[in-house]
Every structure is written in structure tokens, then in C-alpha cells.
């Protein structure tokens, strides 16, 4: 077996050669947070490509009226698994599993995660869950076809028989346990493994967002797990928890699911908010504007997000409309604070329009439009009129596409030199951005109009007399533009890997501790840590002539207090 020999010094001066596997065996057995983080990212991106291909099939079916490109059953399976993969297998694991695993220990100066073996178990649970979901297509009954929200009674054994739905339930439970274990690991790592001098209000905003996301996961995911266990019991053990015939309540599923589902929106969004907050200051050549405002806005979002679940249930007639409407409108305030701090950071800065910055700005533009339409949907009369139409589809996709795709690629290109020790091709990345940005507008703006014209969501076929054809064709063209953009990203990664341009340890003149080590980092992360005197320790080290006097002296005072 080929091995890498790593020299480790011992107290007696003796040098020990520790043998580590490489290649497939390293991927299979490693507990290094960097390798596990890359495993999460690679796996999530594969699921993203598969789910994106499903989206292309969905849009092709809707390109023309009376189309029979796929059957109704196949269409239901496609939009169910497309939504499930994007939400459960791509968006969360890509940021919370991938970026958090790789970057968070580096940003706080830690050698690894607090529980490396638990970290490895989390990844394997996630991979097993993803494969289980896809195996549904190979069962006699086909994959789950009740939508990614799996509303009762559509998800009952009577309406959705077979192994495909059962595999979907098992898949979501496995991915949920993976998220819970990762959350425990991230909270412990952040609290106990910070570098000397790194107080809580010197943490990078990315770390703050991951910490708050982890706490939200520990609150929300157990509720979903309990709901899924009860659904499985209804399907196989003869219980009637969600069945009216046995004295149960189908709407109970909606309450349990959305108590998970609305915090889940911010579980998906907050990590990407953190990524954008790392990118914008570096490419604006300024410190982040309103650091504490961002921290408290993040905490406010987390608190409010656990209390607004029922705004997804306005049309059920079972919830208190004024309370949930007011709370839904209120959550827009801390989100707006974040947007203004990002704009304030760019204001007056020396902005460099590299690909990470372009994707960050694109995220703000798309997310703001999706957020404004969310404020509209928080009003019950508007929600009543648009709830089951393509208006909601457009809003939902703009919010999640803006965060997971645009902010996600901002982080991918920003940290790509750190991950690989190579530079990507800037020209290809910029072409990818413009194709994706224009494609997103062409895809989703017509869907808002389709919703206002009354086109229902979840339908596979419409008639020429409905007058939906032109807008659907424009939307489909936009979707293919985005598909082309992602194909260009694959080309960029391939070219950058096959014809490498070496990257320095800090090609962007970054601010935080991950830029104080080599690219890619060594196995133990750091040979030497710079002193942490502010939220920008690497900037302070590289630019002593610009160090802020008050920040540095208050930092020294805090260090003296810690020593005493």
C-alpha cells in the first residue's frame, strides 16, 4: 500500500513516522475535517447536478401545452425528488457540511473538529441517506411522488404505496441525524477550540452564522424526525396519527413539518449569509460594516424563525392569521439589517469585481427580490390568492437560488485557492456568473406572471386556451441558460485542475485565520498562529501600518484580563 509519511516530533526529541493511507482509502477512513469537508462538497455538488437534470426534465415537460414528454406519475416523482435533493441533500450539506467543516476550524485557529470520528459518521449517514432516496427510482412502485413536503394524507400507505416513499422517509431521517451530529460538533468546536485571544465578538461572521445555524438544527431537526417516525408508523404499524378515519389529524403533519420547515429556510440561508459577509469586505478592501449589528440580526432571525411556521398554513383555516402575519413581517427587519450592512461595507470601498464578489452582489439582487415577494406572501389576502400558484414557486426558488447557488459559488470561488492550492480561470467564472444571473431572471420573473395569471403549481399539463405557453417557454429557456452556466463551471474546474496555476497562501489579501496557513493547509492546519487582536487578525498582521489603535489596545486589555 502506498502511504504518506508524516513526521511528528515527540517530547524526547524522537521523530516518529506516522503512516497515513492515500487515495480511496484516505477518503474512506479519514477523520481530518478538511477531507470530510471536501467529501461533503463533492457529494452535495453531485446531488446538485442530478437534481438540476431533473429540473431540466420538468421544464421541458412544461415547454408546450398538452406535452407528454414524461407521464404524470414520472413528473410527480421528478418534482418530489428534485425538491428533496436540492433542499435536504444539496443546500444544507453543501454549506453546513462542506464549508463549515473545512473553514470553521481554520477560522478559529483549531487543529480539527472537536469530535473527528463523529464528524466522519455524519458524512457517511448523509451519503447513505442520499443514496437511499435515489434508490426509490429502482423500486416497483417508483420514487416518492407526494412532493418534498409529503403532506398527509397524500403520503399515507393508501395514497402512496410501495417502497419508494419508505426509502424517502428513511433517507430524510438519516440526513437529519447527520445534521444533528454535525451541529453538536460545530457548537462544541466553536465554544472550546478557539485560538487564544479570539473572544466571541472577534469570531468571523461566518463562524457566528454557523453557530446559530447549528443551534437551529438542534431545535428543528428532532421535530421532523418525530414527525417522520409517526408517518412511518401510520404506514406500517396500523396507527392513525395523521388519519381522520382513525381519529387522527392530517393537519398535524403540517404543523410538525413547518415547525421544522421554516427554521429550515434559515438553516439553509444563514450559512450563505455568512459566506457573503466574508467575501464582501475582502473585495471592498474594508472591514465589515456593523459587525455587532450583523451578529444580533442573526440571533434575531434565529429566534423569530421558530415562531412563524404557520404562515405556510394560512389557507388551512386552522391558524391565527394576525399573529403569524405580524411575526412573518417582523422577521424581514433583521434580514433587512443584514442587507444594509452588506451595502454599507461596499459603500466607499475599493471594490474589486472578481468572480466571488460578482456572485455575492448577484446574491443580494436576487435574494432581495425573493425577499420582497415573501413580504407580500406574509399578508393573508395575498397568500390566499397566490398560495397554490407559480407565484409561490418563483418566490421560493429566488430565495433559495440566490442563497445556495449565487452565495454558494461566491464561497466556492473565494475559497477554491485554499481548498486546492490552485487558481480557477477568472474569465470562465465571470461568463458563468452572467449566464446564471440572466438565466435566473429569465426563468423566475415569468413564473411570477404565470402565478398572477392563475397557473397552479405541481401540474404537468396545461391547455393552449390557458394562455400559459409563452411565459412557460421563456422560463424554460432561462432554465437551460442556467444549466449551461453550471456546465461552464464544470469546465472551469476541469481546466483549473488539469492546467494548474499555483495559488499563494493568501491570494485575496484576506482577513481571517484560514489565510494565515498554506494553500491547501497542512494536516495540522497551522505551523504558527498570528496574534488575535481583532476580528481581522491576518489583516492586522499583514498591514500593521493600518491597524486600528483602539481595536488593538482594547484587544490587549482583554488578553490581560483573560490571563489574570
Image (cartoon, rainbow, N blue to C red):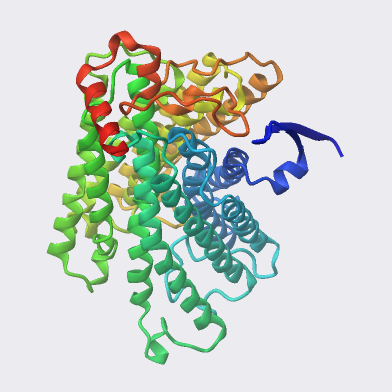
Q: Between 7 and 245, which is closer to the camera in this rendering?
A: 7
Compared with 152, 16 (above or below) is: above
Please tell me which residue lies in front, 171 or 163: 171
Taking the image as shown, residue 404 lies to the left or right of residue 502, namely left
Q: Residue at x 63, y 55 (%)?
A: 124
Residue drawn at (42%, 84%) of the image: 241
Specify whether residue 270 is in view: yes
Residue at the top extreme, as displayed:
545
Q: Position of residue 78 (x, y in %)?
A: 56, 55
User: x, y percentage for residue 263?
Assistant: 33, 56
- Quadrant where the image shows the C terminus: top left
Q: Quadrant of residue 309?
A: bottom left
Residue 49, horizontal then vertical, whole percent: 59, 41
- Any part of residue 467 in sight: no
- Residue sitting farthest toward the bottom: 246
Q: Position of residue 238 (x, y in %)?
A: 52, 89
Residue found at x 39% / y 25%: 531
As drawn, 137 above or below 555: below
Question: Left or right of 299: which side holds 105?
Answer: right
* Image quadrant containing the N terminus: top right
Amino acid at each position: 500500500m502506498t502511504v504518506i509519511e508524516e513526521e511528528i516530533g515527540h517530547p524526547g526529541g524522537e521523530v516518529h513516522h506516522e503512516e497515513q493511507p492515500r487515495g480511496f482509502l484516505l477518503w474512506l477512513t479519514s477523520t481530518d475535517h478538511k477531507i470530510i469537508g471536501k467529501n461533503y462538497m463533492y457529494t452535495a455538488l453531485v446531488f446538485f447536478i442530478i437534481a438540476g437534470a431533473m429540473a431540466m426534465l420538468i421544464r421541458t415537460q412544461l415547454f408546450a401545452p398538452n406535452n407528454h414528454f414524461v407521464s404524470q406519475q414520472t413528473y410527480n416523482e421528478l418534482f418530489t425528488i428534485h425538491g428533496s435533493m436540492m433542499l435536504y441533500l444539496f443546500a444544507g450539506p453543501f454549506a453546513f457540511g462542506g464549508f463549515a467543516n473545512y473553514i470553521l476550524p481554520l477560522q478559529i485557529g483549531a487543529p480539527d473538529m472537536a469530535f473527528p470520528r463523529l464528524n466522519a459518521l455524519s458524512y457517511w449517514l448523509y451519503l447513505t441517506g442520499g443514496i437511499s432516496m435515489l434508490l426509490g427510482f429502482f423500486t416497483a412502485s417508483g420514487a416518492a411522488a407526494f412532493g418534498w413536503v409529503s403532506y398527509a394524507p397524500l403520503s399515507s400507505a393508501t395514497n402512496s404505496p410501495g417502497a419508494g416513499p419508505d426509502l424517502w422517509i428513511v433517507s430524510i431521517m438519516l440526513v437529519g441525524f447527520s445534521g444533528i451530529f454535525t451541529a453538536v460538533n460545530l457548537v462544541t468546536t466553536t465554544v472550546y477550540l478557539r485560538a487564544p485571544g479570539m473572544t466571541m465578538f472577534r469570531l468571523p461572521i461566518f463562524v457566528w452564522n454557523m453557530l446559530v445555524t447549528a443551534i437551529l438544527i438542534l431545535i428543528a431537526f428532532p421535530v421532523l424526525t418525530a414527525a417522520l417516525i409517526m408517518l412511518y408508523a401510520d404506514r406500517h404499524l396500523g396507527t392513525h396519527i395523521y388519519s381522520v378515519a382513525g381519529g387522527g389529524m392530517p393537519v398535524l403533519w403540517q404543523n410538525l413539518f413547518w415547525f421544522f420547515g421554516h427554521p429550515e429556510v434559515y438553516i439553509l440561508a444563514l450559512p450563505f449569509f455568512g459566506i457573503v459577509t466574508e467575501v464582501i469586505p475582502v473585495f471592498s478592501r474594508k472591514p465589515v460594516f456593523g459587525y455587532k449589528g450583523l451578529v444580533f440580526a442573526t440571533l434575531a432571525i434565529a429566534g423569530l424563525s421558530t415562531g412563524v411556521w404557520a404562515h405556510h398554513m394560512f389557507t388551512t383555516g386552522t391558524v391565527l392569521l394576525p399573529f403569524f402575519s405580524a411575526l412573518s413581517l417582523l422577521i424581514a427587519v433583521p434580514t433587512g439589517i443584514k442587507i444594509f450592512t452588506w451595502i454599507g461595507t461596499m459603500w466607499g470601498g475599493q471594490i474589486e469585481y472578481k468572480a466571488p464578489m460578482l456572485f455575492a452582489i448577484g446574491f443580494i439582487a436576487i435574494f432581495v427580490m425573493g425577499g420582497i415577494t415573501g413580504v407580500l406572501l406574509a399578508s393573508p389576502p395575498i397568500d390566499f390568492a397566490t398560495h397554490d400558484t407559480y407565484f409561490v414557486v418563483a418566490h421560493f426558488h429566488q430565495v433559495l437560488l440566490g442563497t445556495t447557488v449565487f452565495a454558494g459559488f461566491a464561497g466556492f470561488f473565494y475559497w477554491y485557492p485554499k481548498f486546492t492550492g490552485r487558481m480557477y480561470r477568472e474569465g470562465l467564472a465571470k461568463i458563468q456568473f452572467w449566464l446564471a444571473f440572466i438565466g435566473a431572471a429569465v426563468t423566475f420573473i415569468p413564473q411570477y406572471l404565470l402565478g398572477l395569471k392563475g397557473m397552479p403549481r405541481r401540474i404537468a399539463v396545461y391547455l393552449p386556451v390557458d394562455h400559459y405557453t409563452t411565459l412557460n417557454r421563456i422560463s424554460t429557456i432561462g432554465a437551460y441558460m442556467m444549466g449551461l452556466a453550471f456546465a461552464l463551471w464544470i469546465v472551469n474546474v476541469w481546466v483549473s485542475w488539469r492546467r494548474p496555476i499555483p495559488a499563494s497562501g493568501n491570494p485575496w489579501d484576506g482577513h481571517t485565520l484560514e489565510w494565515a496557513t498554506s494553500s491547501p493547509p497542512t494536516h495540522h492546519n497551522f505551523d504558527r498562529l498570528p496574534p488575535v487582536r481583532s476580528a481581522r487578525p491576518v489583516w492586522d498582521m499583514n498591514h500593521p501600518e493600518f491597524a486600528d489603535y483602539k481595536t488593538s489596545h482594547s484587544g490587549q486589555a482583554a488578553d490581560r484580563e483573560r490571563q489574570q
